[in-house]
Amino acid sequence: MGAQIRVYKRRIKSVTATKKITKAMEMIAASRIIKAQRKVAASTPYADELTAAVTAVAQTSEVKHPLTTEVERPVRAAVLLVTSDRGLAGGYSSNAIKAAESLTARLVSEGKQVDSYIVGRKGVSYYAFRERSVQQSWTGFTDSPTYADAKAVAEPLIASIEKSTAEGGVDELHIVFTEFVSMMTQTPVDRRMLPLAFEHTAEASAEVFVRGNEARPLYDFEPSPEQVLDALLPRYVESRVYNALLQAAASEHAARRRAMKSATDNAEELIKSLTRLANAARQADITQEISEIVGGASALADATAGSDR
């Protein structure tokens, strides 16, 4: 029995040490979520206004720009997948990969060839294990991305859509990332960034003037709409990639916090269970010792009584 108690004590000590680690990781993730949320809130207005400006210049001019014009029969698409560099975040990366797989399958069913671009070691490892080709990958910044990181990611994507498909370019650009909804909800989403999908909102509809019989947004473009598009669209892609990276970082921290909290709670339950088993083993050991003492005393009494006769 003593050996069994020692086994329980060793397991309790081991689980307690693990609990300290998971608790510390939970607290670190919780502190980083706040910073990530602030970055998302700071970047979103810029990305939205830039999108509105690009949409306005594309809609109010007759310019046929390659980054805003739908290809009649698209044959090639680029998919940017955002995962994490580290694990211990529950199903964060696997859910994003599933969303990318679903998008890829849909694009392939439409007769398009898919070029994959990956952010994060988890996504890179997933594709490498299955020996799938990846056009380009980036690692090392998923938990705290900067605008420079987003610019580095966006550069080859912009170059690929500016080329013709005969030169290795693409007709469409999609991004798959995990959208941060709340501390408890993070949703993998896929968005088409290019060609630009125009959105008609109430705010955009309110700011118009009438030219003839046609309502147009109140914008003037200098020196020309073509040059404005050339300047704005790279910034548009960079801002959207940056916002997606920030959303993914916040989602990663939230998922890791939730996973570490679950691990900490499980460790506490396991410690309680092992403590009960250790107490039961100790009680059984004590009971056995008492039984042995009582049995020995009884045998001694019987022997003494026999000698008196």
Image (tube, rainbow, N blue to C red):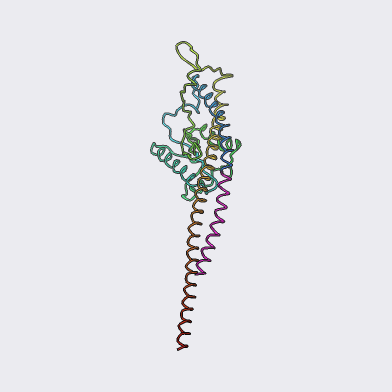
Residue 245 in the magenta stretch? The answer is no
- Between 52 and 114, the one nearer to me in the picture: 52
- Between 42 and 142, the one nearer to me in the picture: 42
Q: Main secondary structure of the magenta part?
A: helix
Where the C terminus falls, by quadrant?
bottom left
Q: Residue at x 44, y 41 (%)?
A: 99
Q: Residue at x 44, y 29 (%)?
A: 71
Which segment did they paint magenta? 1-29
Q: Position of residue 182 (x, y in %)?
A: 50, 37
Residue 28 in the magenta stretch? The answer is yes
Q: Position of residue 218 (x, y in %)?
A: 53, 16
- Between 131 and 280, the one nearer to me in the picture: 280
Q: Residue at x 48, y 78 (%)?
A: 297
- Between 123 and 255, the one nearer to me in the picture: 255
Residue lying at the far front in this picture: please name it: 309
Q: Residue at x 49, y 54 (%)?
A: 269
Q: Position of residue 170 (x, y in %)?
A: 48, 35
Numbered label tally: 0
Q: Is residue 97 above or below residue 194?
A: below
Q: Position of residue 292 (x, y in %)?
A: 48, 75
Residue lying at the far top in this picture: please name it: 212
Q: Is residue 112 above or below residue 67?
A: below
Residue lying at the far left in this picture: please name it: 109
